[in-house]
Image (tube, rainbow, N blue to C red):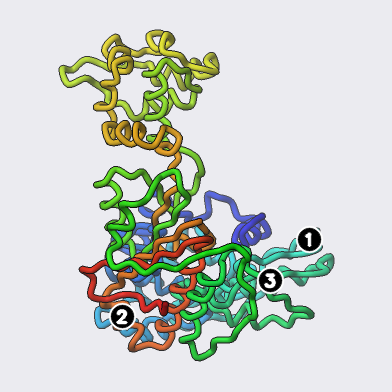
Amino acid sequence: FRTAHSVCFKQLGVSRAEMISGGKDDAKWVSEAVGSDVAFAVDEDEEGGVAIHQGDTVASAALNYWSLARNVCRPLREIVEADSDPDAPAASEVIKRIEMYEQAKRLDGRWDFTDLLSRFVGLKFDPADGPMEVTPEGAVPEEVVGWIFDEAQDASRLLDMACRRLVTGDSCRWAWLVGDPYQVLFSWAGASADHFMGWDVSKQHIMPKSFRCPKPIMLAGERCLQRLPDYWDRGIAPADHDGEVIESENFEDDLSDLRPDEETLVIARTNRNVAKIKNVLEDIGVPFRYAKQKNEGATCKEMGMAGLWKLQHGEGINGEAWGRITEILPSKTPDGKEWLRRGSKAAWKRSLSDQYDRVYPEDLPELGASPELCDAIASGRWSGLPDGGTKWVRAAKKWGVEAVSEPKIRIGTIHSSKGMEAAKVIVLTSVSRRTRNGEEDDDRKFAEERRIEYVACTRAKHQLIVAHDPRSKYRMEIPL
């Protein structure tokens, strides 16, 4: 399992030191290259797109334009001048910044991830003149007999060209492209279902039946798509199990009914509205996690809290949990005494962690816990030490340690939840005025909003709640 970028990385023989990969040092390098402070960000902005660079207005916009221009294989000037935003920088200023960026890359021997694809497919991008064909670099992996390109509807033209070159190997006998043309949410990065649907294929298979969405939920999603001029019925049968769609006029009431031990996905159109969801859940003390959280299981903070709880109740914990406890504790008591002896954290990481498979309350002094800390743990006063400890204990008493440590409630944007599912899904319908105006003025944005609504609805397996905020003036128009 690899990304296309990682395949090109391997075939080109590029070293990690040459890559501009997004760390703090790389952000500093890019800032110096373009003459202004910029930072990397992989996150949905208020309109659902992902701003790859943030910071100085002109420099960050120039880098984002450059990424898009290369992914769609069009001249940079054309991309900039197509932006209807009245605050968009002039094309001449954008080209100037990108020429600085590309010159710095040449001098220092650096590459960004888009360069990997362009070198592999044989395209050279000039900031002033646009794309030019050159000799492709890197060999096609000859040992690969078959390729499966998942989420193929999200391919940009450049990524699609890379996939098409990969299947030209002498050993390649077959390729599967898997995707849903109605789930294209990343047009900001050049994604288009036209590339997925444009392959010359020998067979086509449409999933005959949904294994997730029962009839009411599937119909809600289809009604979103039916507003598109190019809609076509794929003939997919709904799942056999029962389901329901509920419309609610106050999303806060729906959040107050949630339990952290029940599988739930709460999603919204923008990060601003995800923040509203977060604030409500925190106010009522319902534990949750973010949909985009990469790792499963408890977070560092949650694992530490659970470890302190178990030690308080005389139970043993594993070594990882004790390590997490040392990370979430403050360094000193209010009167200046140490909770842990100086050097005990380093000693744990260096050697003690190998000596303790399990840590029990009686082991704490040997691990550097002060008498004050041992007493705070035994008495339960530890809840006032780590940030959020009191709320965590209150929730643990109500729902249990497991439900609080690994809550089944996930929240996030619709974009971040793509590919996920849950028994219950709550969709907060609020959108911004800019989104509403954009879809009224631009047919492409109108189509993208309908696809976003479709993806939101079809995350649900049993219950879909379309929830409104009575204070919001603009809403998604999900037909129910």
* Comparing labels 1 and 3, the label whose residue is closer to the camera: 3
Instruction: Look at the picture and state if 386 lies above or below 171.
Output: above
Q: Quadrant of the N terminus?
A: bottom right
Front position in the image: 85 or 359: 359
Residue type at tag 3: Leu
Q: How crowded is mark 2: few (under 14 residues within 10 Å), some or many (20 or more)?
A: some
Res 144 label: 1
Q: Distance between the residues labelled 3 and 2?
A: 33 Å
* Comparing labels 3 and 2, the label whose residue is closer to the camera: 2
For disc 2, the marked residue is: 436
Does residue 410 appear in the picture of this structure?
yes
Q: How far apart are marks 1 and 3 (CA)?
A: 16 Å
- Residue beneath the point at 50% across and 19% down: 353
Query: Does label 1 or label 3 sit earlier along the sequence?
Result: 1
Front position in the image: 276 or 124: 276
Query: Does label 3 or label 2 sit earlier along the sequence?
Result: 3
For disc 3, the marked residue is: 177
State the SS at label 3: strand
Which residue in the rendered view is the most extreme toward the left?
Answer: 335
Is 318 situated left or right of 338 in this image?
right
Q: Where is residue 314 in the image (x, y as percent from the top left)?
A: 42, 15
Q: How crowded is mark 1: few (under 14 residues within 10 Å), some or many (20 or more)?
A: some
